[in-house]
Amino acid sequence: MVGGRMLMESPALDAELLAIKKRVSELEEQVRTLNAANLALVRAMEGLNEQLRRSPEDERHLAATTR
């Protein structure tokens, strides 16, 4: 029973259910793609952050060795 009424199986309902399942699958694929892109972005930002953190140390080391 759905919404207070008994739903009988019918080709129209089957077609609608199939269309909804297909759309859900497409949306799930988009979510997976966006999650992968987000993870790649986070890793890239972490790499840049690490480079920025190391940069002053590298400059001090270079200055100390050239004196």
Image (cartoon, grey):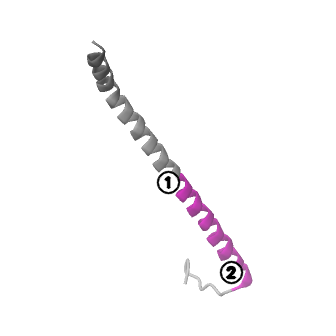
Residue 66: x and y in percent read 30, 15
Residue 5, placed above or below residue 46: below
The overriding secondary structure of the stretch rendered in magenta is helix
- Of the image marks 2 and 1, the number of the one nearer the N terminus: 2
Would you identify the image quadrant in which residue 8 lies? bottom right
| Residue shown at the point (39%, 40%) measured from the top left | 46
What's the CA distance linking mark 2 and mark 1?
Answer: 31 Å
Quarter of the figure that contains the C terminus:
top left
Cβ atoms at labels 2 and 1 below 8 Å apart: no
Q: Residue furthest top?
A: 67
Residue at the image position 50 percent from the left and 54 percent from the top: 35
The tag on residue 35 is 1
Which residue is painted at 43% across and 38% down in the image? 45
Amino acid carrying label 2: it is Asp
Three-letter amino acid code at disc 1? Asn
Question: Which span of residues is magenta-colored?
Answer: 10-34
Res 14 label:
2
